[in-house]
Image (cartoon, rainbow, N blue to C red):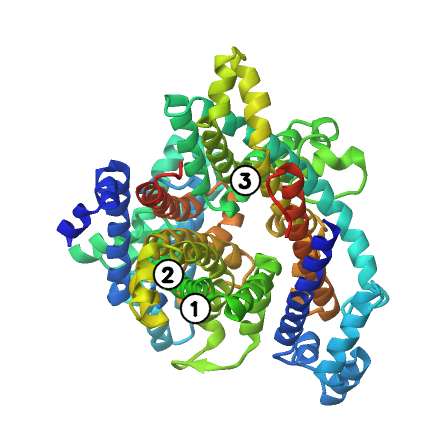
Amino acid sequence: MMQRIRKTRAGRKLLANRMALGAMLIIGVYLAAAIFVMLGGISPSFCNQPVGPPNIPGFFAEAPAEKRLVNAENTLAVVDRALAKSTPESQQASLDEIQVGLRKLEKISLDDFELKLEKAYAIYDDLSASPDLENDESGLALLADLESEVESLTATPTFSQQVMETIYLSLGTDRQGRSIFIRAVFSIKVAVQIGVVTAMISVAIGSVLGALAGFFGGWVDHAVIWLYSTFSSIPNLVLLVVLAYVFSSINVEIFGKAIGQTLIPVYVAFCCTFWIGPCRVIRGETLKIKELEYVQASTTAGFSPVYTLLRHVLPNTIHLMLINFSLLLIGAIKSEVILSFLNLGVQAGAGASWGIMIRDSRSEVLNSFFWQIGAATTLMFIFVLAFNILSDALQDAFDPKHV
Amino acid sequence: MWAYVFRRLIYNIPVYLTIIFVVMALLRVNDPVYAFLGKNTTQEDIDRRREEFGLDRPFLTQYGEFLKRLAFFDFSQESWSRRGRKVSDEIAGAVIPTLSLTIPALTLTSLISIFVGMISAFFRGRNLDRGLVFFAVLGMSISFLVYIILGQYFIAYLPQKYFESHDMKETWGSVWFAIQGYEPGLQHWFHYIMLPVLISVIVAMGYDTRFYRAVMVEETGRDYIVTARSKGATQSKIMFVHMLRNALIPIVTRIMITLPFLITGSILLEMYFNIPGMGKTLITAINEKNLPIIETFTSLFAGLFILSNILTDVLYAIVDPRVRLT
């Protein structure tokens, strides 16, 4: 395989481009992550599960003191509510149900819980009286006490649990306490899935129609031109929105899920508009190739037009398909963000996507919390950048006239 | 030329009819009246409304009537969700906000990116060019939404908060970029519209700069540049007179293709900054299942797209005498 690529001029040029190789490496890493998620590494339901207090910053930075106090108080309140139940049995039952992040509560007697809670609340009362917690040395020390007191309520995690927790909290949590890291990584799979599926289908439809139109001409050409001028005359975003809206209200079930909950509406909406680009390009290229000697030779030799098309014309447009694939993939990933903003893209049941994360982070940004938007944007930025560089390199390698 | 325009118009009629057919059919896949009224309505209510809206008739009759109205530019249909308001009122109210956003945005983007593209092409292969191309690719790789969210926060929200806490709300706060909203009148233009314009310029810059650079680079290799240089023309004269003139064809095409967006507007920016333009009106109508507005707006937009395509080809022939319209 490598040998064959090296033999072509374009292949050599591509392999000599260090930026392109780097981009391919990055894309490989992303694909590996996507495959890991797809094989069950992260389930969609896990994406939506809280793993800690809301909006804690990433890289284990300390949240503002106010916030830490509120978080500690929230945990105390949950335990307190459980202890307020009437009978000891129901108290125990609701204590068993409590989860602080991913941790269960410590298995100690109800009286011990009462004692600990009382102690913690005593510290809390002292602290909440403090007017300026952020700059108060003794207050901060007390806060640390309170936090360790709260932590002693929960079961001591095993080593593997600790490692997992470290990973989950590495980029902080969103407003519902869900792990930003997990959601961002899961979104890689959603992005790759949307990108690859829509780009592949669009390029396939576009190339087939474009090649047929260019090769056979006549009424086929007219029909294809009519089809794509129709689709391209509806503003892109409007068509996407109308299609997504139609799908969201259809009650058809696929694989046991309502169709509005799957990614199918997104695929269809994207494919309807994305096939036009490759179709135009490939039609133009086919018109050019059709006049070349080897195609004429094939026709003269008596091969059927279909054979000539498949054997001599289509293989010579593969580089255009490749470039278009790469460009459409970027387009799909970026459009997904916009559809999600309009609430028409990936639905919450399907897990997470960069679009959903960026949309959700709007209110967080107003509170100066940048971890969610930062994580989603960075991951998306690197991926899209890699594809942008790769498309440029492909264009450079295959189209020497292009600058 | 007029024969060409006429022929293209005729040729595009079936395209236009299909578009309207597809959009109308798509919107009727699910009962639009039921979707509009919501789940808590009786069958009688739905039937009554359906008759009122004229949706009880066969689809082809509805299609024919819509076409007839469109042909006579009769937009007097009543909006579903706001009684008494005609579709034409909605259009009239939305055009000006949209144009006040898109015209400056398109002008600024084109001017700046043509200039940057020229500079980049002039210094081709050198560090300045590499840096500009690199930044263009970087800029293209960030989502539109991120620009909007961060731009709004850092350029509008933080300064406005600062003004509020320092008692400058009356003086500075009403001049500096607003967080969102819209008020008619030229004196409010900077306050409400300038920030969306800036953001859309920044977003479009990446794509346009690369395109114009490619156009200019193609021109730098031409013979007439060598001729101009050998007869002693100054560098700036070569760039701004000889090159720019010849690069005008792709530039004009590029700008013409984006013209329909003047009307359709930037849906995202209008949604985010709460500007009551065409895009926002359409999205609101879709959310409210407001059929007359969705249908009229999409058919208007599609018509504009088709007209601008024809106009592009005609202008192409005017700018470049080698192109024959056949």
The kind of residue on which mark 2 rests is Val
At 45% from the left and 49% from the top, the residue drawn is A70
The disc label shown at residue B204, or none: 3
Q: How far apart are marks 3 and 1 (CA)?
A: 29 Å
Residue A95's place in the image compared with B168, above or below, is below
Residue nearer the viewer, A172 or A216: A216
The kind of residue on which mark 1 rests is Leu
Residue B13 x, y percent position in the rendering: 69, 65
Mark 1 burial class by Cα count in 10 Å: few <14, some 14-19, many 20+: some
Element at badge 2? helix
Q: Residue beneath label 1, please? A: A263
Subunit under mark 2: A
Which comes sooner in the sequence, label 2 or label 1? 2
Residue B290 x, y percent position in the rendering: 71, 68
Contact, mark 2 vs mark 1 (Cβ under 8 Å): yes
* Residue B297 image-quadrant placement: bottom right
Res B90 seen here: yes
Residue A187's place in the image compared with A209, above or below, is above
The disc label shown at residue B66, or none: none
Contact, mark 3 vs mark 1 (Cβ under 8 Å): no
Q: Residue beneath label 2, please? A: A190
Element at badge 1? loop
At 79% from the left and 35% from the top, the residue drawn is B186
Element at badge 3? helix
Quadrant in which the N terminus of chain A is drawn:
bottom left
The answer as to whether the residues below labels 3 and 1 share one chain is no
Mark 3 burial class by Cα count in 10 Å: few <14, some 14-19, many 20+: some
Subunit under mark 1: A
Q: Give the farthest residue toward the left.
A: A3
Residue A167's place in the image compared with B200, above or below, is below
